[in-house]
Amino acid sequence: MHDIKLIRDNPAAFDAGLKARGLEALSASLIALDDRRRRVIADLQGAQERRNAASKEIGAAMGRKDMATAEALKAEVAALKDRLAVGEAEQRDAEAELRAALETIPNIPAADVPPGADERGNKLYRTHGVKPAANHLGAQHFEIGEAMGLMDFEAASKMSGSRFVVLKGQLARLERAIGQFMIDLHTQPEDQGGHGYTEVAVPLLVKAPAVYGVGQLPKFEEDLFKTTNDFYLTPTAEVTLTNLVREMVLEQKELPLRFTALTPCFRSEAGAAGRDTRGMLRQHQFQKCELVSITTPETSKDEHERMLVSAENVLKKLGLHYRVMILCTGDMGFGSQKTYDIEAWLPGQGAYREISSCSVCGDFQARRMEARYRPADGKGPRYVHTLNGSGLAVGRTLIAVLENYLNADGSVSVPDALLPYMGGVTRIEAIKK
């Protein structure tokens, strides 16, 4: 969420950031709301000061035996008490109106984010590996899995409807192996070739304040699953990992904090009707290994690059070709200042598809969560910077492995990095009938 003081101090820069997002200027209307709030507060302070003074004058008047003045002052104090009650309600309303306006405005893009209205404005950052030719059968992942008899969308549909899948046998094991490989890589110490994140086991059901803290509420409620007793199913472990520092004041020496979790994720995909209806690309339920960093403003840019490298290393170790894109101003997420998308090459589709997003959010989420740190110089608390990324989406990584490691006979070779997790299985093959 935005700081109204910063908006007041530099309204032109704020409006320019919104324009880059394709939004109209809002600084004038926000400052007007803040002006109202300030007037109400000033009136309250004046009334409180007069009430305090009048209360003292009552004692002085009674000491002089001036009962008429004392009674008049008592009447004034009673009236001021009523006025304060009304004023406090007006203050709550003014603050709520300003907050409601601020909480639906997206983050301002960083200066180096390319301009653009949609994904066509995204810019190539770097690539890794060589794009392989189309696989031997020209098959997409769902054709490969169904031909093996190990991927069953029909059974899932009978139980749960569309956008679910049942994986069986060694394909289910391969998905589990991919997730285990990711979490192990991210949690291993850096001197052992890992990335040094702390693994956290987190709840999958959370209350509204946690979802609000990362910017999912109130604007994106339709994308969430909600229970009848007011829990939300987590759309990503970003929600829970980031909220670990909610309403805390950390010491600078504790930072950066780096958390990771391998969890199921749940999304209604309300905004994706008709997109990727075949296969596993866009599911209501999926596994993801999430990365979250909590750091200082001075180090968040470097931390963003580090997180990107951590996510890339998963694909490098799996031997998969990919590219990294810098998302343009019109394609970034609501809370992001800057986002890198990692897109894996899928030979069956003949296209790059997103497999990870790594975003730096500045203090946008921290303000919503009241997450701060105490600088080493002893000055007052400052808001932390938060970052989040996929390291990676497990189902999409499974898709990439199926399409890139497909053999001419319809089997799929297991990447070397996953062999320790597969109990001696080196190839995923069709069920023998």
Image (cartoon, rainbow, N blue to C red):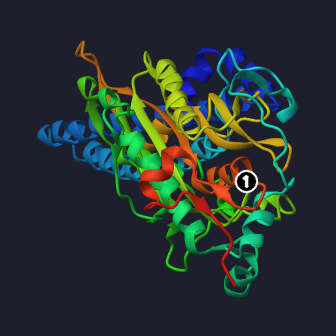
Q: Where does residue 10 sit, x and y in percent of width and height?
A: 63, 15
Residue 231 is left or right of residue 189, and the answer is right
Q: Nearer the viewer, residue 420 or 19?
A: 420
Image quarter for residue 372?
top left
Query: How many numbered badges does the structure rendering display?
Result: 1
Q: Nearer the viewer, residue 95 or 176?
A: 176
In the rendered image, the vertical position of residue 154 relative to residue 95, given as above or below: below
In the rendered image, the vertical position of residue 335 relative to residue 136, given as above or below: above
Q: Nearer the viewer, residue 145 or 19?
A: 145
In the rendered image, the vertical position of residue 419 relative to residue 197, given as above or below: below
Residue receiving disc 1? 406
Task: Please name the amino acid that badge 1 sits on.
Answer: Leu
Q: Where does residue 324 sit, x and y in percent of width and height?
A: 69, 28
Q: The N terminus appears in which quarter of the rendering?
A: top right
Q: Is residue 209 visible?
A: no
Which residue in the rendered view is the most extreme toward the bottom? 158
Write the residue at 69% across / 85% down: 433
**Element under disc 1:** loop
Q: Is residue 93 visible?
A: yes
Q: Where does residue 14 sit, x and y in percent of width and height?
A: 68, 22
Residue 221 is left or right of residue 257, and the answer is right
Which residue in the rendered view is the most extreme toward the front? 409
Write the residue at 47% across / 47% down: 182
Residue 212 is left or right of residue 71, and the answer is right
Which residue in the rendered view is the most extreme toward the top? 377
Q: Where does residue 177 sit, x and y in percent of width and height?
A: 49, 57
The local crowd at label 1, few if under 14, some if 14 to 19, many if 20 or more residues have their Cα within 10 Å, is: many
Q: Nearer the viewer, residue 307 or 378?
A: 307
Write the residue at 56% across / 68% down: 170
Write the residue at 17% across / 36% down: 60
Residue 196 is left or right of residue 404, and the answer is left
Image quarter for residue 146?
bottom right
